[in-house]
Amino acid sequence: MLRFLALLLCLCPSALFAQAPPSQSAAPPATILVLDGSGSMWGQIDGVSKIAIAREVMAGLVTGLPADQALGLMSYGHRRKGDCSDIELILPPGTDRGAILSSVNAITPKGKTPLSDAVVAAAEALRYTEETASVILVSDGIETCDRDPCAVGRALEAAGVDFTAHVIGFDVAADPAAQAQLRCLAAETGGLYRDAGNAAELGQALEEVVVAEPPKAVEAKLSFRAIEGPQGPVIREGIAWTIVSDTEGTLLSGYPMPEPELTLTETTGKATVVRMADEAVAEASFSVPVAGGPQTITLVLPEFLPPASVSGPATAPAGSRIKVDWTGPDGVHDKVMIIATGTTDDPHHDHAFTSEGTPVELRVATTPGQYELRYVMNATNKVLARQPITVTAVEATLEAPDTAPAGSDLEIGWTGPDADRDYIALVPAGEDYRARLTYAYTGNGNPARLRAPAAAGAYDLVYVLNANGARELVRRPIHLENVGASFTAPSTAAPGEKITVGFTGPMEDRDLIIVVRADTPNPKEEETGYPRKGSPVELTMPLAPGDYEIRYMLGGRHGEVIATAPITLTLPTATLSAPAGPVAPGSAFEVAFTGPAFANDRIAIVPAGAEAKAEVENTRANRGNPAKLKAPKTPGSYELVYALGGKYGPVLARVPLNVQ
């Protein structure tokens, strides 16, 4: 722990221990000498302890004082170890020089350094709030009892009638923090500060302060701050200050403080700040004017940019993928990007986060021109590194028939970059590629396969480079021609009946033949046939009676209707012959019936009055007549039903069945 050698004297503000001018009869104000008795006083300079040097210097000083100068003695840290309250007024102010020297020689250093509280105690002993008081501090270290000497100096100056503390730094040249603290205590009260490195310098410094104190100079408070770039934020960490006065020498040296403050008398000087992270340096001169007043000295450091690099190819085809090596801080969401030179908001740029490792893969823009690879630090959005890259043009071709049937499957041969997500699109003639009606990715093979729209007319095939910001490379026209279809089908049928439908038509892969209600505007098939399997197709009719249409759908269920045939569905009749009397639970019995006996028709047993879907036993009607059933195991009233097309179809006949 650092220690202070503190010598505090209560001094008059204009001249310390100097005799009053001839025109004045009053004696000099009383003074208290406060001597540091802390353990650090046993430290040696040139083989002699600092306490011994202080005793010798004080012996010479005291004998030369004016006879009427009242001098007191205060010490601290001289009685107990580790006690911040060990402060003692040994002698009140008086003129007995022998008592002063005897008391000084009797001090044995032991403890801590409560120098701030000692200054306050000396000031209070001199009634500094009522009378003139001055203090001289000789220190070899730093405050060790959690007080701020700067704040203490300000408080004493504010509360005192005319309070001044003069400070001598004894053997503190190697401790910038101690120097700054001691200098601040003197400056806050308008006192002098002197450095002393040995006995001779200590004596000289004391003589300057005691005998020949100059008049108080005009002073001003200077604040120093460093900012990052013009108009940038204040830098509060990672910097060190050196402040030199042309008249007082080095005030701070390599001091790690965000915004140091000094109170200086009239002087000029230079402040230097160094940022440790990149060793950037800024300097500024300062001047304390005669009129005084607070000043803020601002030093501008360049913006901090951590080292980084990007390395990729010098040229790349439009839409291609490239690999980019990088070095840099790899901060959260830092990224490597490719972007048009001179821009910050290129909508077609691509990027990859550095967290993905190196190298990263980027998609080159589709528009030829000059671009940059950049390393961007996310925390500040600063570009740390750049490399130019030229994006070169690419070409493409399309091969396809001039005409094709509407709704047919097209095969388009192509050449081109085949970049990520490139595609061949079909658009209405003259329309932008974004008006595509259908498309196929080039990555799915060559030739590309498209299904033509069902509507005849003029269209364009377009090769779209879509790797990073879509762009059309080439287009060619194609005309789609009308195609026809026809049906050969019955005009009536029963619900659930399977009928045979002959047809003519293009028979493309996605074409459908469906049966729907005649008034259905947007077809939803009830039954579907596939023309590509050839004519005829078999269709099972819906179970609900009514008017229907058979439709040929070009290109699927949402395609164009190119042929229709009407068909009316009418419910057939059916009868059932139940056993004459009750049947035993679980017993087998036969049921004679009449009806269409379509593939899914059922003869079932249901609870009396229930729908067919509540069946408890059933058999298919096409398995033979009479139908063979087994009675439920639970006695009760039941019914035999004939269900057209299965248990969810309409019931054509119903008779009671008694199970006992």
Image: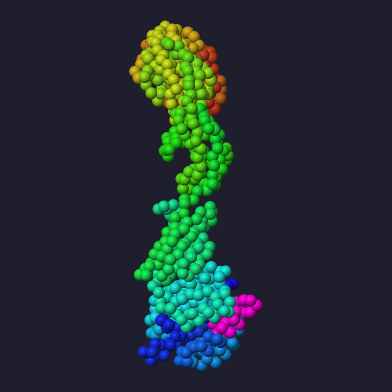
Q: Which residues are magenta?
A: 35-58
Q: How was this image coloured? A: rainbow
Is 621 located above or below residue 205 in the figure?
above
Left or right: residue 24 versus residue 446 is: left
Left or right: residue 357 versus residue 223 is: right
Between 536 and 138, the one lying in front of the other is 138
Q: Which quadrant of the rendered structure holds the N terminus?
A: bottom right
| Image quadrant assignment for residue 570 | top left
The question of residue 547 being in magenta is answered with no
Between 604 and 590, the one lying in front of the other is 604
Does residue 554 appear in the picture of this structure?
A: no
Left or right: residue 32 versus residue 130 is: right
| Image quadrant assignment for residue 53 | bottom right
| Image quadrant assignment for residue 80 | bottom right
Residue sitting at x 45%, y 13%: 408
Residue sitting at x 44%, y 76%: 191
The question of residue 41 being in magenta is answered with yes
Is 161 located above or below residue 181 in the figure?
below
Residue sitting at x 54%, y 39%: 310
**Percent of width and height locating residue 636:** 49, 28
